[in-house]
Image (spheres, helix red, strand yellow):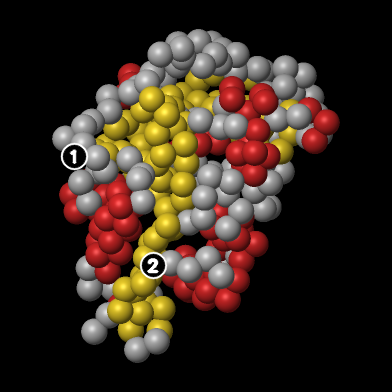
Amino acid sequence: MYEFRETEVSESHIIRLSELLTLVFGKKQEHGTSYLKWQYQENPYGTALGFDAFYEGQLAAHYVTIPIKAILNGNEARGLLSLNTATHPDHRSKGLFTALAEKTYVRAKESGYEFVVGVANGNSTHGFTRKLGFDLVTPLSAKIGLGNPSVERKSHVKFKLLWDKDGIFWRLRRPGAVYSMDKNHNVYGATKIAGIHAYLGPHMKLAPDSSLPHLKAVNPLRLWIKAGDDESLNPCYVRIPDFLKPSPLNLIFRSLTQPSYKLEPSDVEFYLSDFDAY
């Protein structure tokens, strides 16, 4: 019989969560305790909200979201970004992921959150849309090019994340990440490929330039990832073919207050900095 508990964000429990994530996915920066503390404890918009399953004292499964702020239909709204999920190999095919997620969304609605949004890969998208009531809004577009992306924020969209000063400072403290800035104050994250830097989005220009090193001219290529396309993007950028991507990334959305509500691709503005990549 499984016992379900709301996820703790204590240091001792974060160590247990790190061990489970490492067991399931292998040792990565994103599964270390400093990274989980950054996500679960230090977020200025609130601590992590999720549920864990235990079997005879063993941590069997974990699912978590973190608080975010957004504009939804012209109004400021509190929501959650869906993040980590893991099930111990001994406890798979028991429906634990679905049970933990639904318990999380019930508690989230009780706590005043209005929606859950996430970026799912090709393997997990099906589970979110078929079992948990999410809508697949749109695949994320990925392009690569030279020079300043020259992207301008849309003035009217139904959904976009809100970033204040504290949120930006927290986002740019992501453990293990290396950030830099070009002469136009655009902020980039270093990728695993030498010479290619990922553009975080136009709202990150609010970061203080004194805190970031300047991007070197010898690193000219820029990676641009966003939900949907953007007509204002520098024409020197070209779409990356699907066969060159490790996995397709899909923007998914679920309203907690209006179950039938859906977002269209043209309704959203969602950049690389709005989820946990780079």
Earlier residue among tags 1 and 2: 2
Q: Position of residue 13 (x, y in %)?
A: 53, 74
Q: For the residue marked with disc 1, what is the amino acid?
A: Pro
**Front in this rendered view, residue 79 or 222:** 79
Q: Hey, which quadrant is residue 96 in on the image?
A: bottom left
Q: Which residue is mark 2?
A: 6
Q: Which residue is mark 1?
A: 259
Q: What count of labels does the image hold?
A: 2
**Front in this rendered view, residue 27 or 85:** 85
Say whether residue 272 is left or right of residue 87.
Answer: right
Q: What is the CA distance from the residue labelled 1 to the residue labelled 2?
A: 24 Å
**Front in this rendered view, residue 205 or 234:** 205
Q: Position of residue 261 (x, y in %)?
A: 21, 32
Q: Position of residue 72 (x, y in %)?
A: 36, 28
Q: Secondary structure at mark 2?
A: strand
Q: Hey, which quadrant is residue 224 in on the image?
A: top right
State whether residue 137 appears in this view: yes
Q: Are marks 1 and 2 in contact (CB under 8 Å)?
A: no
- For the point 61% across and 66% down, the residue is 33
Mark 2 Cα within 10 Å, few/some/many (few <14, many 20+)? some
Residue 102, above or below 169: below
- For the point 60% across and 65% down, the residue is 32
- For the point 56% across and 16% down, the residue is 151
State whether residue 90 appears in this view: no
Q: For the residue marked with disc 2, what is the amino acid?
A: Glu
Residue 155, above or below 201: above
Residue 151, above or below 241: above
Q: Secondary structure at mark 1?
A: loop
- For the point 35% across and 79% down, the residue is 54
